[in-house]
Every structure is written in structure tokens, then in C-alpha cells.
Image (cartoon, helix red, strand yellow):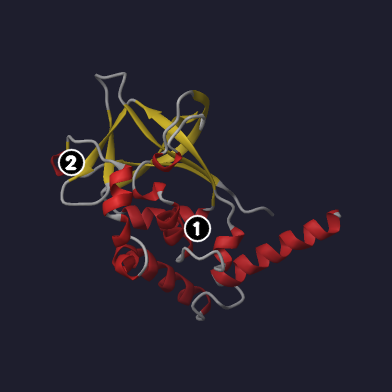
Amino acid sequence: MATPTHSAFFYGTLMAPQVLHRVCHGSTRPSNPIYAAHQFELSPAILHKYRRHRVRHADYPAILPVVNDPTATVRGTYVTGLTDADLWRLDIFEGSEYRRERVKVRLLTKSGSDEASGQGNEEGEEVEAETYVWIADPKDLDEREWDFVEFQREKMRFWVGREGQGEYAEVDDAVASAEHQQDGTGGRGAKGHISMALKEEQAKDEVARNAV
């Protein structure tokens, strides 16, 4: 039975593949078996009738729906290939200040675009995705727009490598706790997430060989 997949729209730090893979896989290294088993596809996209704000005293943004401005939009990244386990990790990463909601976004063409910042020129297909909407105190938000390029230039180093470990502590602790409760081996036993990812990858290889 195939693993269920989900799609999501990310508009902040998770637009950076390094951050997304760190949350979902515990690593940014392709050698990680979970990294290899998941096939994420990223595309620039736009969400209408929402506005992105800086979160005060934080590196990340938040979005809120906008009722009185039909021109309000948020550009970001549409990601497919997410599993139930990925969403569980993402929910923990986002925390209680956000609620995961289903929205409709438009895919953007990449022609003449700045792919690093999720920009595009023309709107295309409309697709459904899940995204994280701010539900904490709106007073904690700044009216200024959050800038992904600025984040990459000035803040990314605090989110990758050793300097960024603290940003993922809650996710890492939750994953470790769940895996030890499941099989007592930290994910390396027969039902641990590492072993299951390896089995999935081996099954894919076998199907590919049989199809030749």
C-alpha cells in the first residue's frame, strides 16, 4: 500500500529546502534514508486574500486572511510528496501559534522568475494545499512584509548546522520519544522510522527491477 502523500504551501523559513528537510528528516544530508525515501517536489505558488507579516522579535513570518483587500497575496512554495509523519513533524515545528488549514493556491510559472524567493510571472493551475495560519495574538505581528531573500542572507546560518539545532529541539525530542515508545531502538528497529524508510526504498528498487 502506497504511503499517503500531502501537499502544503510554505511562505516562510520552510521555503528553504535545508529547513524543510531538517524538520521532516532530521538532517539535510541526502545520505539520510528518510531523505532518500521522500520525493518532495517544490514549485513557486501564490496565495490570494492573505497577507504575510513579520513576527516581532523572530526570524519567521505569519499569515492572516484579509477580508477588505482582494489584492492581498502571499508568494511562497508549493510542496508535494509530504507524508502523514512529515505533517506531524511540521505541526510540532510550527507550534501552538499556528493552525494548519486547507487553502487553494495558484502555481506560478518559473520563466523569468527568482526561484530562490518563490517568485513567478504568471498564475497557472489552482491546487489545494495545507498551510499554517497565525492564531496567536495579532499584536505580536509587524505590519512590515517578511523578506525571504533577506532571511537567506542574514538569518539562514542560524537555522542550519550546529547553530540551528535549537530551532528543531521540540521536533527532535518528539520524534525520539515516539520512536523509543514504538520499538525501543531509537527508530532503528523493525518498525522504527529509519528501518521503515529503508524498507520503502528497497521495495521501490524491487518494483523498478521487475519492470525492466
Quadrant into which the C terminus falls: bottom right
- Residue at position x 43%, y 54% in the image: 20
Read off the residue under disc 2. Answer: 141
On the picture, is 28 further left or further right than 57? right
- Residue at position x 43%, y 36% in the image: 114
Name the foreground residue: 125 vs 197.
125
Q: Which tag is nearer the camera, tag 2 or tag 1?
A: 2
Question: Residue 202, relative to residue 142: is it above or below?
Answer: below
- Identity of the residue furthest to the bottom in this view: 185
For residue 158, which quarter of the picture?
bottom left
| Amino acid type indicated by mark 2 | Leu
Label 1: how many residues lie within 10 Å, few (<14), some (14-19) or many (20+)? some
Q: Mark on residue 102?
A: none
| Amino acid type indicated by mark 1 | Ala
- Residue at position x 71%, y 66% in the image: 202
Q: Position of residue 147 (x, y in %)?
A: 28, 41
Q: Position of residue 193 (x, y in %)?
A: 55, 68
Q: Position of residue 67 (x, y in %)?
A: 27, 22
